[in-house]
Image: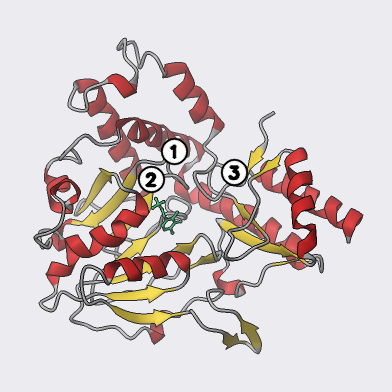
Amino acid sequence: MRPWNFSAGPAVLPFEVLQQVSAELTDWHGSGMSVMEMSHRGPQFKQIITEAEQDLRQLLAVPDDFAVLFTQGGAQAQNALVPLNLLGRSADKTADYIVSGRWSQKSFEEAQRIGPVRLAASSNQAREIDGKEYAPYTWFPEPSGWDINEQAAYVHACSNETVGGVEFADWPELDIPLIMDASSDILSQPIDFDRVSAVYAGAQKNIGPAGLTLIIVRKDILGHALPQCPSALNYALLEQQGSMVNTPPTFAIYVAGLVFKWLQQQGGVAEIERRNKEKARILYEAIDKSDFYSNTVEPSVRSRMNIPFQLHDAQLDGLFLEKAAEAGLLQLKGHKSVGGMRASIYNAMPLKGVQALVQFMQDFEKEHG
Ligand SMILES: *Cc1c(COP(=O)(O)O)cnc(C)c1O
């Protein structure tokens, strides 16, 4: 059996998808070519990208007035490309940022290089909630307290802070476009497209291989790119040219397309959401009922995708990781800024893998607690 892989990203892919990729690697559907060797403008790849888009639209119920763009550069390139493409919507070329952790902080910093963007809310401070003290970036600034500039081109936020383990699911209805970095929770639950004008994600957490960046954007906010926006990464041009301003990441799009079909076979996003909730529930329950492990995120915004946890004695961290790897539980080391452990349990992590982790944690506690 393969080990269980808890990497935060690039992350585990469905095993069935890897097997299919392997079976078709040198000859895709009798074409005599690997997908890697095909013209991106030929009929075979046209079929691959068209089906990928159709399946994604079906899975997330993407409305027709939204474009689906398959592009490159990763989520961090979007930190510059979102302002380059969208700031021109506002006369003052400004935008508002919600900072709730490491990733949205990076988005805010990069955007400052493009235009005069503002901080509308931040959780980078300790805060008391229900009589309990929470550390910076372990809670989420609730939308009722956002200081929004109604003249801004957009508000940017991150729906799941992969490092801190903070997830923001209750998106508000705003009068200006909400732009969401959903790199680490896209396709883990349905999206309400009445509340968001653009969602983007690097593929390597919940979609497919690194190298592909997915953008789902409402078409009516396009067409105002700043003059310095690179043409190959201009959303309006990508929309007009079917994501083919230049060569798109063809192999990554193909694998993502297989992941979309796998999701459909699992019963779609609603069923995946149900499983994700169950996986997160059993892991948080195991952490909360023990004095040996802890998670310090405010309970109402705990991530269902990335679950950081600490051992009561950090000196045991090395041993925990070593024994976990021996037990077939890989890549559990926490992000260096948080320390401890982090279990990333994306769509492709089955319930069985989480159960194996919980069992290992209990056994380790018995031996070392
Ligand atoms: C991983 C991640 C990023 C960075 O992605 P790259 O593709 O490496 O640029 C940005 N935002 C979030 C929320 C992430 O999880």
Instruction: Report the amino acid beneath label 3.
Output: Met
Which is more N-terminal, label 1 or label 2?
2
Up-down: is 367 above or below 46?
Answer: below
Which is more N-terminal, label 1 or label 3?
1
Residue 25 lies, in percent from the top left, at 42, 19
Asked whether mark 1 lies closer than 8 Å to ligand 1, one says no
**Colour convention:** secondary structure
Instruction: Report the amino acid beneath label 1.
Output: Gln
Q: Is residue 84 left or right of residue 318?
A: left
Front in this rendered view, residue 158 or 163: 163
The label nearer to you, 2 versus 3, is 3
The residues tagged by marks 2 and 3 sit, at their Cα atoms, a distance apart of 19 Å
Image marks 2 and 1: residues in contact by CB distance under 8 Å = yes
Q: In the image, which disc is placed on residue 349?
A: 3
The residues tagged by marks 2 and 1 sit, at their Cα atoms, a distance apart of 7 Å
Residue 306 lies, in percent from the top left, at 57, 57
The label nearer to you, 3 versus 1, is 3
Determine crowd level at label 3: few under 14, some 14-19, many 20+ residues with C-alpha closer than 10 A: many
Report which residue position mark 1 lands on: 264
In the figure, residue 217 lies in which quadrant? Answer: bottom left
Residue 309 lies, in percent from the top left, at 68, 62
Q: Which quarter holds ligand 1?
A: bottom left
In the figure, residue 37 lies in which quadrant? Answer: top left
Q: Is residue 301 left or right of residue 83?
A: right
Q: Residue at x 52, y 23 (%)?
A: 19
Up-down: is 211 above or below 127?
Answer: above
Up-down: is 147 above or below 191?
Answer: below
Instruction: Report the amino acid beneath label 2.
Output: Leu
Q: In the image, which disc is placed on residue 59?
A: 2
Q: Is residue 23 left or right of residue 342?
A: left
